Amino acid sequence: MSTKNLSAEKRTRQNEKRRLRNKSAKSAIRTASKQVVAAAQEKNAAEAKAALQDMIKRIDTAARKGIVKKNTAARKKSRMQKLVNKLEG
């Protein structure tokens, strides 16, 4: 480490930590939404509802932390909710 750019080096370390945290959260959202779609394709309403609740929780947390934008979160939740509602109706 050079003494000249300590703050820049710290910023680089922080950015890398945040990037990995954000990547993990986005990946978890994608995995959860795939589980909702899979359950919906199998016509398993109970499993789809449970997967939807998990997905909504993950999306809301990510939106609150600024990992995904608020409108993106709302759009994803709405689309999945419509998919699950088709199973019941």
Image: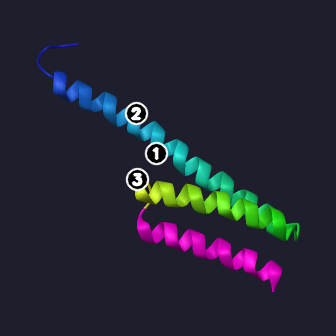
Does the magenta stretch mainly form a helix, a strand or a loop? helix
Q: Report the residue at 32% width, 32% height from top.
A: 14
Q: Is residue 81 left or right of residue 75?
A: right
Contact check, label 1 and label 3, Cβ < 8 Å: no
Q: Earlier in the sequence, mark 2 or mark 1?
A: 2
Question: For the magenta stretch, what is the residue range?
Answer: 69-89
Quarter of the image where one finds residue 43:
bottom right
Q: Which mark is residue 22?
A: 1
Which residue is farthest bottom?
89
Q: Amino acid at mark 3?
A: Lys
Element type where label 2 sits in the image:
helix
How far across and how far down the image is residue 64, in percent? 42, 58
* Vertical arrangement, residue 3 with respect to residue 75, above or below: above
Query: Residue 2: horizontal and vertical position, in percent?
Result: 17, 13
Q: Which residue is mark 2?
A: 17
Q: Nearer the viewer, residue 57 or 28?
A: 57
Residue type (three-letter) at the residue carrying disc 1: Asn
> Dot 3 corresponds to which residue?
65
Q: CA distance from mark 3 to mark 2?
A: 14 Å
